[in-house]
Image (cartoon, rainbow, N blue to C red):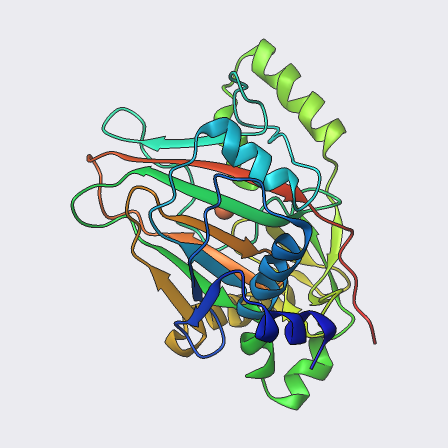
């Protein structure tokens, strides 16, 4: 038992209820609006890494408290493609009749178009339609482990090119927007990430390509790359690897983008679903042979 796990079993500042066998846990008895002491923050991060996505219900946080909570787990991102408001670290996801969703309904790990993609995302529900609007996560470590040894050997050590594919639709075909897009391409040139990523804390391997941000596998011809990516993308569809959360206002979820992918179910249009997100900057992904 690790030191942290031993501490958790001795002196529990909160309860962890596993909901899925390998992914998904509910946290009970915690008030996330208040600053967490160091041990509680560490234990919460340990539970997050172990269960990959954790959530707590009935949390009454202001936007400023949400940011303060995120900062306890590292430096926060400012998302490059979302308009800045009063709180640049907050990404507002407010979808309704006049603002349909943009590509959150494609499986992905957050911001892998960056050299240092998101480590943790912390998403807070402000408003939910009466039905629909769930989020699904897939355990990409279980997805990797579920492949045959031969397939794992084939993809271990491969690399893939990533791109902000979906955000390109935000730019119009005007001289001004073409200039803005060119600046974004300079700021975020296509990074190359390992197809199989080693988790820096657990040492476990996870599939790290997604239909939202991956362009191609380096060193394969186009047909080969497309076939292998399609096979790897299908792993997120396996129910045994998935966890599905029904949101309510006041639900807040933390997930580890190093070991999961997610998909926001787009089944509620034209009703309104309003969320706010902060994201903790991650390290450079790597594969440990
Ligand atoms: Fe996302």
Residue at x 29% of width, y 56% of height: 246
Image spot of residue 30 (x, y percent): 46, 53
Q: Is residue 164 visible?
A: no
Residue at image coords 58%, 23%: 88
Q: Which of the two residues, 192 or 83, is positioned nearer the viewer here? A: 83
Q: Nearer the viewer, residue 182 or 247?
A: 247
Residue 92, horizontal then vertical, whole percent: 44, 30
Residue positioned most to the front: 11
> On the rendered structure, is 195 left or right of 143?
right
State the residue lying farthest toward the top. 176
Q: Residue furthest right?
A: 289
Residue 116 location, quadrant: top right
Above or below: residue 108 compared with residue 149: above
The N terminus is located in which quarter? bottom right
x and y percentages locating residue 91 in the rendered image? 50, 31
Relative to 20, say whether 33 is above or below.
above
How many numbered markers are drawn?
0
**Image position, residue 37 (x, y; %):** 64, 48
The C terminus sits in image quarter: bottom right
Residue 289 appears anywhere in the view = yes
Above or below, comparing residue 204 to residue 280 in the picture: below
Residue that appears at 65% across and 71% down: 7
Which residue is most to the left? 130
């Amino acid at each position: 038992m690790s030191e942290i796990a031993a501490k958790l079993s001795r002196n529990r500042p909160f309860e962890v209820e596993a909901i899925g066998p390998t992914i998904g846990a509910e946290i009970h008895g915690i008030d996330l609006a208040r600053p967490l002491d160091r041990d509680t923050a560490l234990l919460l991060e340990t539970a997050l890494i172990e269960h990959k996505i954790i959530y707590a219900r009935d949390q009454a946080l202001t936007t400023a408290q949400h940011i303060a909570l995120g900062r306890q787990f590292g430096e926060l991102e400012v998302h490059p493609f979302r308009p800045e408001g009063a709180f640049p670290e907050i990404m507002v996801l407010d979808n309704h009749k006049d603002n349909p969703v943009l590509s959150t309904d494609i499986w992905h790990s957050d911001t892998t178009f960056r050299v240092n993609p998101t480590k943790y995302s912390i998403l807070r529900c402000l408003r939910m339609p009466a039905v629909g609007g769930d989020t699904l996560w897939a355990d990409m470590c279980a997805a990797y482990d579920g492949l045959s040894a031969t397939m794992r050997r084939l993809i271990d050590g491969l690399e893939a090119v990533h791109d902000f594919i979906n955000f390109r639709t935000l730019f119009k075909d005007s001289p001004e927007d073409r200039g803005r897009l060119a600046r974004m391409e300079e700021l975020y040139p296509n990074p190359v990430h390992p197809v199989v990523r080693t988790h820096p804390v657990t040492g476990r391997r996870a599939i790290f390509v997604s239909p939202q941000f991956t362009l191609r596998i380096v060193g394969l011809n186009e047909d080969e790359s497309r076939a292998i990516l399609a096979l790897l993308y299908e792993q997120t569809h396996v129910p045994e690897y998935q966890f599905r959360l029904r949101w309510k206002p006041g639900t807040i979820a933390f997930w580890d983008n190093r070991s999961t992918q997610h998909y926001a179910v787009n089944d509620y249009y034209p009703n309104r679903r309003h969320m706010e997100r902060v994201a903790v900057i991650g390290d450079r992904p790597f594969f440990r042979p």
